[in-house]
Image (tube, grey):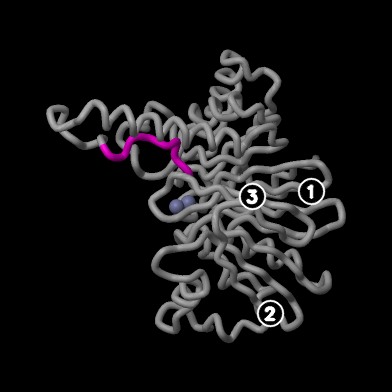
Amino acid sequence: MKIRFWGVRGSIAAPGPDTAVYGGNTSCYEVRNAAGDLAILDAGTGIRAFGMSLLGKGKVKASILISHTHWDHIQGFPFFVPAFIPGNELSLYAPVQFEKTLQQIIAQQMDYSVFPVRSAELLAEIRYHNLPEGPFAIPGFSGFAKFVCHPVTTAGYRLEADDKSVVYTGDHERFFDQVHKNMPADQIDPDEQEAVAAMVDMQNAQMAKFCRNADVLIADSMYLDKEYPTKMGWGHSTVEMNIRLAIEAGVKHLVLSHHDPLRKDADLDGIATYARQLLDESGGQGIALSIAREGLVIEL
Ligand SMILES: [Zn+2]
Ligand SMILES: [Zn+2]
């Protein structure tokens, strides 16, 4: 299995001299099995350059797994040139939404009022799939979709091929008690609070199970614990949360990604040093660590 990183930024593209090393494009990861079958995790702005790299190399057949339909995860799709070429076959997957289908959301993103080409005019053969939680199969990979904690239905994906596995969290926050978060203390029923706490623990245990023994875990690590109090409920995890998750789940290689657009290259260099130290001090000496950057390739 081979993973190439095309976009590692969260929320919005952040180009410029301060982000040139790690890159400013939003989420997009290329995953290939040994036979060359192609899965693409998210279609953020990073997918544009990836699409250009595929030109002139024959028919493109790909499964595009969208973690969720926030802009930073779909915004590159209208600029993915292989979607405009007849004969290419693209299967798009996203978790089932309550209000709209994936096809409707992509069509909305390419509505004539905001984009010159309508999705119906794309010349590749495009299939849209709304994924429920659970196992699924795509050409070359067996997969599992796990719904995670984020302000819209969001799936993390586990892909397995050639006895190797990669887990991509999508945007995720460690599960927490959302019911009592803003409730005045005198209105809290202790029994109910305890019941919710037990459910939250179970959800976090399921997340660890989903990541169990993964060869690579690509995790949304937008914040640090010290920044988290004002970001709680925004749907993103911290570097420290993902370090604890990786250790608990026995992950072999942790990749911190979905960087805050405010993070400069120097900030991410500092996070690399800090995260390595924290892993070593916390029993994660055997876990490899990378800070996601455009152009990074991990071969398994
Ligand atoms: Zn995002
Ligand atoms: Zn999001």
- Between residue 102 and residue 53, name the one nearer to us: 102
Please state which amino acid type lies under the numbered disc 2.
Glu
Pointer 2 local density, CA inside 10 Å: few below 14, some 14–19, many at least 20 = some
Q: Which residue is drawn at 40% across and 34% down?
A: 199
Tell whether label 3 touches label 1 (CB within 8 Å).
no
Question: Residue extending furthest right?
Answer: 35
Residue to which mark 1 is pinned: 161
Q: Is residue 45 visible?
A: no
Q: Does the magenta stretch include residue 27?
A: no
- Distance (Cα) linking label 3 and label 2: 24 Å
Q: What stretch is highlighted in magenta?
A: 172-179
Question: Residue extending furthest left?
Answer: 186
Query: Closer to the N terminus: mark 1 or mark 3?
Result: 3
Q: Quadrant of residue 290?
A: top right
Image depth: mark 2 or mark 1 in front: 1
Image spot of residue 229 (x, y percent): 32, 31
Residue to which mark 3 is pinned: 144
